[in-house]
Amino acid sequence: MKLDQIKELGDEKFRRLTGVRKRTFSKMVDILRKADGLKKSKGGRKNKLNLEEQLMMGLEYLREYRTYFHIGQNYGISESSAYKAVKWVEDTLVKHPNFALPGRKALMKSDMNYEVVLIDATESPIERPKKNKNSIIQERRKGIH
């Protein structure tokens, strides 16, 4: 579905497709536009996708949890470009105070009863352990009897 078609959907269908309301979507685009202006002030190559498409791609990833390869194919970009765009959208929105969740201490001090439970099930990149010389030598010694 193209972005023009998605924007023409009613409020309820838009929310069912993206997971956010149109009003929230436009606020997200404004936040990304400000962050993109700061990023572009340093120069560099233009993105193939505009900000709305990058945000849609990020929401699609979070909503449907499809692979970056499949999302990239839908938008006509590579898997690595899809990863970079989704990661930038996530990081930019998480850093903004409008989308930041209160900390544990703030939740404990407040008198409000929360009825919502959030579970973060997104991938978190980790580094593989480095192979050092000592572990390789010990493996060789174990093999020789």
Image (tube, rainbow, N blue to C red):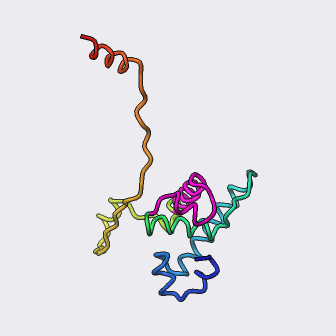
Left or right position of 23 against 36 = left
Left or right position of 17 against 7 = left
Left or right position of 32 against 20 = right
Name the image quarter holding residue 5: bottom right
In the foreground, 145 or 5: 145
Residue plotted at (73% across, 58% down): 46
> Where 139 sits versus 42, above or below?
above
> Where 70 sits versus 12, above or below?
above
For the record, the magenta segment spans 66-93
The extreme left residue here reads 145
Name the image quarter holding residue 102: bottom left
Residue 68 image point, x, y percent: 51, 58
Residue 78 image point, x, y percent: 61, 55
In the foreground, 106 or 38: 38
Majority secondary structure of magenta residues: helix
Query: Tag count in the figure?
Result: 0
Q: Is residue 89 magenta?
A: yes
Q: From the image, which quarter does the C terminus lie in? A: top left
Q: Is residue 78 magenta?
A: yes
Residue plotted at (40% across, 33% down): 129
